[in-house]
Amino acid sequence: MNRTAQTMQGLSLPDTDVLSEQVTVALGQNPSVFTGPGTNTYLIGTGPRRLLLDTGEGRESYLSVLESAIESAGCQGIQEIVLTHGHRDHLGGVAQIRKRFGPLRVHKLRYPDFDDPHDLEANPLSSGDRIETEGATLCAHHTPGHAPDHLVYVLEEEGSMFSGDNILGVGTTVIPMETGDLRQYMNSLEHMLGLSPKRIYPAHGPVIEDGCEKIREYISHRMARETQVVECLKKKSLTPIEIVRIIYASYPENLYEAATQSITHHLLKLEQDNKVTRGSSNPTYASWTLI
Ligand SMILES: [Zn+2]
C-alpha cells in the first residue's frame, strides 16, 4: 500500500487526454498518497453524449476539467454515469455532476452501505449487463476483493478494460481492512485475465498497453508474498507485525502499518484455504500457526 502511494505520489498526468477514438480521460483533481495523481474519469463513446465512467470525489476544480475533456473529445455532454465501485474517490462527484449536467442516470452494482448515504438511486447492475452509447458498449463484470461492489467493464469495440481499482497504472492495489477480501481479489484477477484485455484503463495512473501481462504480474506478486508468509510460519507461530518485521526488514518502519494490513489479508486468505489457524479473534493481533 505505501509503496504504491510513494510510487504514485511523484507521478503527474495531464488533466485531460484523448486516449483513443472512444476514450478520453479527465483527471479528478484529487491527488493524494492514496489516489496518486487523482482518480481517472473516462468519457466513453463517439456520439454527441458520452458515458462518464467514475466521477472523482467532488472537487470543485474538476468540473472545468471535465468540461474541457468534453471539448477535447468533440462531444456536447454526458449521457449517463457508470461507476466501478462505491469508494468516495469514484462516487463522490456524482452530486456535483448531476447539479451541473442534469439528473443523469447512474449505474453501479448495488451495495447499500456505500450507496444509501449518497442518495444515489442508482440503476443496479450485475455481471454481464451491458451499457450502450454511440460507438461503445460496456459489459460489466463483478470483480470483488478491493471492494465488494467492484465492477470492471470491457469496452467491446476495443477489447479494452476499465479496471477500476483492481489494477492500477502504477504500484499495487490496496485491499482495505473494511471492504477488502484477498481471496476474492485473487479470483477477480483470474476472472479479469480470462477476459484477455488488450489495453487497460485503470482508475489511477497511466494507461496499461499490455493488460494481460500486468494482471499476471499482479497475480504473481501476491502469490510470491503468500509463499513468503507460509515460509515465515514454518519456523514458528507469529503475529502479522512479526511477519512484517521479517519480510519487510529492509523497508522503512513507517511502511509497517500498511504492510501489517496486507499481511493480515494474506493470513485471512490462508485461513479460508484451511492452511493456517489463529490463536485469538482479532486477526491483526492474533498469533497465526500453520496447519
Ligand atoms: Zn477503491
Image (tube, rainbow, N blue to C red):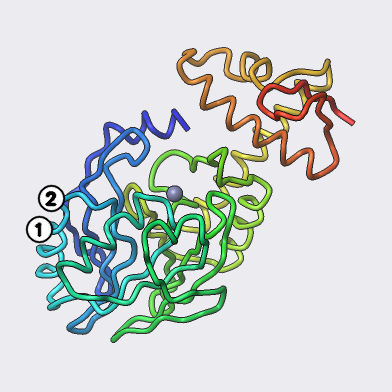
**Ligand 1 is within 8 Å of the C-beta of the residue at disc 1:** no
**Residue at horizontal 52%, vertical 53%?**
213
Q: Does 87 sit left or right of 225 as displayed?
A: left
Percent across and percent down for residue 191 are 62, 63
Q: Is residue 136 above or below residue 55?
A: below
Residue ID for mark 2: 61
Percent across and percent down for residue 41 are 28, 59
**Residue at horizontal 29%, vertical 74%?**
51
Question: In which image quadrant can residue 267 be found?
Answer: top right
Q: Is residue 14 above or below residue 82?
A: above
Q: Does 205 sit left or right of 77 as displayed?
A: right
Q: Secondary structure at mark 2?
A: loop
Name the image quarter holding the C terminus.
Answer: top right
Question: In which image quadrant can residue 242 be found?
Answer: top right
Marker disc for residue 64: 1
Q: Secondary structure at mark 1?
A: helix
Q: Residues within 10 Å of mark 2 (few under 14, many from 20)?
A: few
Question: In which image quadrant can residue 31 be found?
Answer: top left
Type of amino acid at the residue the image marks with label 1: Ser
Type of amino acid at the residue the image marks with label 2: Ser
Percent across and percent down for residue 17 are 19, 59
Q: Residues within 10 Å of mark 1 (few under 14, many from 20)?
A: few
Q: Are marks 2 and 1 in contact (CB under 8 Å)?
A: yes
Percent across and percent down for residue 69 are 15, 64
**Residue at horizontal 50%, vertical 68%?**
109
**Ligand 1 is within 8 Å of the C-beta of the residue at disc 2:** no
Q: Does 98 sit left or right of 128 as displayed?
A: left
